[in-house]
């Protein structure tokens, strides 16, 4: 059944997509093995079913996030994205790469607050180096705060001695001598099982490729770690076959353990001009009727969504001059936030180049205090909190090549909504696509009640609820 879905060319133990065979023939020899066919696609079937069931008369929107550091930034991800678009032309794919080169798990565990959870992907393809405990925290929080399926990639091979590394989990410990073996053959498989993630064992597949063609590991690298064009080709050819729809696993992507769709008039009905439904989860979407315009008002647990503090998100804190790397890894808050842009004027301490002082201004809040990078900061309004450990100026500015750190620079970020208080639905004649509005995202993952006021003429076809599989303690 897998072969039928992918159009597989079989050569003995080798299973290779026909599209990959065509591309490979131009420059690089194709991999002879792309994984155990019995395991390809496990853990990503909600996403793959959304893709597979997209047709010219029914387009599904599918959100995919590539996240990690410099390995994920390399060009291979473009080919994976292009392959999905070629194979599933009727899906409305929203694909982003928010990887931050140079940011280990110790840093990504903080930047995920603005990068990952607000994006709320259907699928996250993930690879990062760094502390194993922070790695697990990222996966756990993804499972607590989104319904995303997660495809964990093991590490590729960077030196020939990796071919004979220890792989027996019983002999592996998190020490420096066998760190890579510990991560790839014990820790990552354990985390994948614990949180129900897919695991792409590209490390072993990479080894098999090098052995099959008698190629030194360095031939696929440009600097001893990062992939060159050859390495990017191979990584793409190992990721693409895993993203397969399996006919032997039935998943209703809109009605499963993670997602529940309740049609209006069947599962829930208008009563006295109100639509009310209890649910468990942290996100609510409203599916609109395609041929009707109208408005309606939303309440969650008796409140406007805008009155729920958790339904706001910070964007990255970006410096001018600077790049895409946030100079403050994570922001906090004590008082409810406003939708606004924040500007921080920063000055390097002339007596201590590792210390920075600043003044803070919000586009709505106005002047909101001053502070220093070595002190806990709470703005006058309570809308911004910064911990000393979350400053990352010198390193974040060095990555785009800004050295030394300027004496003066500006940092900006926004507070953006993960909610809608009102539903404003224009009439549309496109019945091949659902018109969906997310009215609340980021709720405490638990029991809630939604109430919509607008009468029977409100253009609502269904309510859709998202329930992450792991509950925060």
Image (cartoon, rainbow, N blue to C red):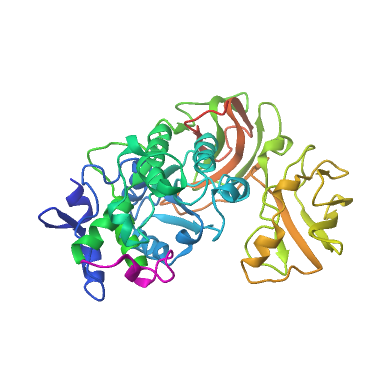
Magenta segment includes 221: yes
Q: Can residue 371 be seen in this snapshot?
A: yes
Residue 312 appears in which quarter of the rendering?
top right
Tell me residue 227's x, y (percent): 40, 66
Q: Which residues are magenta?
A: 214-230
Q: Give the residue drawn at x 71%, y 47%.
A: 389
Q: Give the residue drawn at x 86%, y 43%.
A: 381
Vertical side of 358 occupied by 251: above or below: above
Tell me residue 154's x, y (percent): 38, 50
Tell me residue 266's x, y (percent): 44, 27
Say how many tags the image has: 0
The residue lying toward the viewer, choosing from 204 and 25, is 204
Vertical side of 175 occupied by 261: above or below: above
Is residue 281 left or right of 360 when viewed as pictured?
left
Is residue 320 left or right of 112 when viewed as pictured?
right
Residue at the extreme front: 177
Is residue 422 left or right of 158 when viewed as pictured?
right
Residue 250 appears in which quarter of the rendering?
top left
Magenta segment includes 102: no
Q: Main secondary structure of the magenta part?
A: loop
Vertical side of 58 occupied by 86: above or below: below
User: Quadrant of the image for the C terminus?
Assistant: top right
Is residue 120 left or right of 52 when viewed as pictured?
right
Tell me residue 341's x, y (percent): 76, 55
Residue 322 appears in which quarter of the rendering?
bottom right
User: Quadrant of the image for the N terminus?
Assistant: top left
Residue at the extreme left: 12
Q: Can residue 240 be seen in this snapshot?
A: no
The residue lying toward the viewer, choosing from 53 and 231, is 231
The residue lying toward the viewer, choosing from 439 and 309, is 309
The residue lying toward the viewer, choosing from 108 and 162, is 162
């Amino acid at each position: 059944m897998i072969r039928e879905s992918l159009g597989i060319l079989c050569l003995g133990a080798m299973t290779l997509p026909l599209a990959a065979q065509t591309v490979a023939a131009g420059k690089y020899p194709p991999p002879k093995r792309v994984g155990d066919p019995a395991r390809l696609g496990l853990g990503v079937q909600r996403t793959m079913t959304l893709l597979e069931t997209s047709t010219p008369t029914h387009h599904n929107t599918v959100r995919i996030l590539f996240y990690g550091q410099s390995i994920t930034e390399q060009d291979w991800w473009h080919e994976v994205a292009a392959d999905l678009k070629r194979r599933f032309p009727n899906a409305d794919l929203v694909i982003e790469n928010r990887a931050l080169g140079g940011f280990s798990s110790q840093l990504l565990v903080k930047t995920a607050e603005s990068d990952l959870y607000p994006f709320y992907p259907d699928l996250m393809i993930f690879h990062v180096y760094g502390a194993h405990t922070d790695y697990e925290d990222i996966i756990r929080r993804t499972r607590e705060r989104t319904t995303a399926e997660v495809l964990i990639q093991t590490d590729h091979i960077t030196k020939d001695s990796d071919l004979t590394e220890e792989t027996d989990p019983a002999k592996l410990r998190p020490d420096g001598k066998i760190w890579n073996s510990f991560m790839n053959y014990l820790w990552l498989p354990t985390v994948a099982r614990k949180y129900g993630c897919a695991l792409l064992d590209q490390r072993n597949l990479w080894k098999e490729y090098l052995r099959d063609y008698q190629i030194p590991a360095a031939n696929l690298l440009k600097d001893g770690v990062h992939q060159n064009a050859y390495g990017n080709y191979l990584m793409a050819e190992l990721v693409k076959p895993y993203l397969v729809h399996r006919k032997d696993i039935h998943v209703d992507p809109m009605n499963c353990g993670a997602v529940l769709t309740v049609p209006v008039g069947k599962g829930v009905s208008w009563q006295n001009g109100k639509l009310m439904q209890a649910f468990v989860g942290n996100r609510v979407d409203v599916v609109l009727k395609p041929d009707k315009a109208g408005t309606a008002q939303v309440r969650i647990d008796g409140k406007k969504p805008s009155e729920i503090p958790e339904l706001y998100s910070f964007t990255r804190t970006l410096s001018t001059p600077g790049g895409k790397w946030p100079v403050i890894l994570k922001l906090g808050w004590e008082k409810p936030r406003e939708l606004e842009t924040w500007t921080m004027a920063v000055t390097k301490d002339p007596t201590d180049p590792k210390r920075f002082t600043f003044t803070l201004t919000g586009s709505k809040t106005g002047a909101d205090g001053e502070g220093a990078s070595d002190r806990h900061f709470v703005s006058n309004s309570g809308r911004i909190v910064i911990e000393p450990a979350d400053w990352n100026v010198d390193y974040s500015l060095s990555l785009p090549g800004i050295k030394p750190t300027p004496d003066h620079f500006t940092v900006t970020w926004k507070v953006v909504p993960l909610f809608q208080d009102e539903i404003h639905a224009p009439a549309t004649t496109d019945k091949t696509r659902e018109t969906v509005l997310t009215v609340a995202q980021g709720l405490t993952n638990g029991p809630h009640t939604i109430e919509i006021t607008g009468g029977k003429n409100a253009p609502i076809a269904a309510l859709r609820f998202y329930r992450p599989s792991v509950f925060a303690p």
